[in-house]
Image (tube, rainbow, N blue to C red):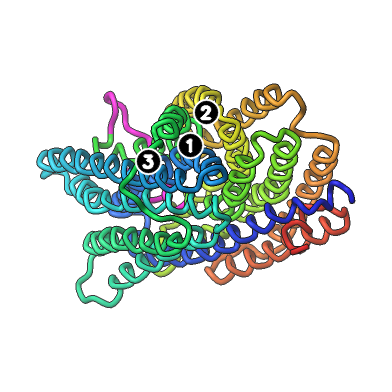
Amino acid sequence: MSTEAHADHRPLAAAVRTVSGLTLLSRIAGLLRDLVTVRVFADSAVGSAFAAALAIPNTFRRLFGEGALSAAFIPEYTTLTRDDSALAQRFATLVVALLTLATGAITIALELVLAFLLTAADDAPDAALSLRLIMITLPYMPLVCAGAILGAMLQVHNRFAPHAAAPIILNLFIIVAATTHFVIDGATPARTAVYISIATVIAGAAQLAWCALALRRHIRWTRSFHATRDAARRLASRFLPALLGLGTLQLNSLIDTLIAMWPIWFGPAILGLAYPLDDASNSILFFSQRLYQFPLGVFGIAVATAVFPLLSRHAREPDHFLQTLRRGVRLSIFIALPATIGLALVSRDLVAVMYTGAGGFSADGAARATAVLVGYALGVWAYSLNQILTRAFYALGDTRTPMRIAIAMVGLNLALNLALIWPFREAGLAWATATAATAQLAALAFILGRRLGVPILDPPTRSSVARIVPLSGAMGILVALSILVAPAPTTWSAHLAILGVAILVGMGAYAAGARALRLHELSWLVKLR
């Protein structure tokens, strides 16, 4: 049997299909959520305040729950589950308890700080609204972080569906809360933002309960932590490096939010100079990020999520580890490269369809959001591969190398942010993030290859990439032509028609080309055998 057809492809491909499929449903619900919320807030100061209120707790979720802690937790829990299930259960109980205490303490401390800052913001209503919304949404952080760890445990037990489906709960709660704006007389965007923030916290509790229910057959919670000290020590030694290593994109996104919120929190000038961003900047940035996160979440992070437990399982088996890593890289490139090209090409029409009309973005806001989306889109392939390569280091027990690279990339991103916002406004933040992600990818790939002692891109992988790149380019040309030959759109429905045709052309051309070139990645994703 050939290596390409080896049965070991099945668990990875099946996991990717499960995570991608449910994440796709979640992201579709997220798009519906954005269709509603953008017509409540548009490109306004209230929209910027709402975006910051969601960004702060979600950054903690991605860093502590789905990011660093999960990355440090999964390899240890995988090993213990294999060697001593009783010890694994005690260790998992300890981690959940400590996480709840730590995130609860952080939440209380931040609430006190925000309450103090709120007393000084009486003469700045937009800043005061922003602080109030953050105070309301902060309790979402400990709830969703605990849910993320339960989701990591489910992944180790080969149950990817429950946690991948959990965001659907959040999106449904937000949609319901946002629709009150259109049915309650006298509703204002600020009041609706409060309702949505409250609904977010309730959704966090529902997500936690959902994951706990799915996990009940796999763990018995205990009050005994006997013999967990060594495992806890190993987890602690990996956590801080993982926090920086895997959280680069999240930290960079948080920095983007802080820079974009400057006009609301501190005023329209900096050091006596007119600031290049305005009150609408964070709203534009937030909703643009939501669009590039669609392919990244559905495919890029889905592949990394599915591959990580397998890498951890094969960490002591170099041949299997390399096979799994290379499959993950090939799947990621196969999905992310055409997504990068396609998203950049359809950005104008996608923004118009999602965010204009019926109270959405203004023409200026839509043009600015398009520029931001193009910048972010060009880094989707790098974001996706970074997720896999960083997790490969963690599966090998090395959290310090990604940490050192990440620190450098955060510094690079900040420097580029401060330089590029002046000529390019919000789009400069997107270009800085994409550039830093590409530099991070180059560093991770080079060092990991040296660590493994063999090239990550072996002959079959190089052969696959050599076919994926021109195929993606050809697909991009066809998509661009389909957009160019269409009449200049002047209505929302015209943008929708162009977007629909471009998507069909892109997907059809890429699938047909992959089949003609006999790319195995396509069969990995669509076949059960």
Pointer 3 residue: 257
Mark number displayed over residue 14: none
Placement of the C terminus among the 4 image quadrants? bottom right
Residue 465 visible, this angle? yes
Which comes before the other along the chain, label 2 or label 3? 3
Q: Is residue 5 above or below residue 174?
A: above
Residues tagged 2 and 3 counted as in contact (Cβ below 8 A): no
Residue 440's x, y, as percent? Answer: 58, 29
Q: Residue at horizontal 57%, vertical 45%?
A: 82
Residue 133 is left or right of residue 510, and the answer is left
Which of the two residues, 399 or 63, is positioned nearer the viewer here?
399
Would you say residue 270 sits in the magenta stretch? yes
User: Could you tell whether 468 is left or right of 165 in the image?
Assistant: right
Identify the amino acid type marked 1. Ala
Q: CA distance from mark 3 to mark 1?
A: 27 Å
Left or right: where does residue 466 sit relative to residue 270?
Answer: right
Residue on which the image places disc 1: 72
Q: Which residues lie in the magenta part?
A: 269-288
Question: What mark, if any, has residue 399 been given in the picture?
Answer: 2
Look at the numbered disc 1 and give the secondary structure of its residue: helix
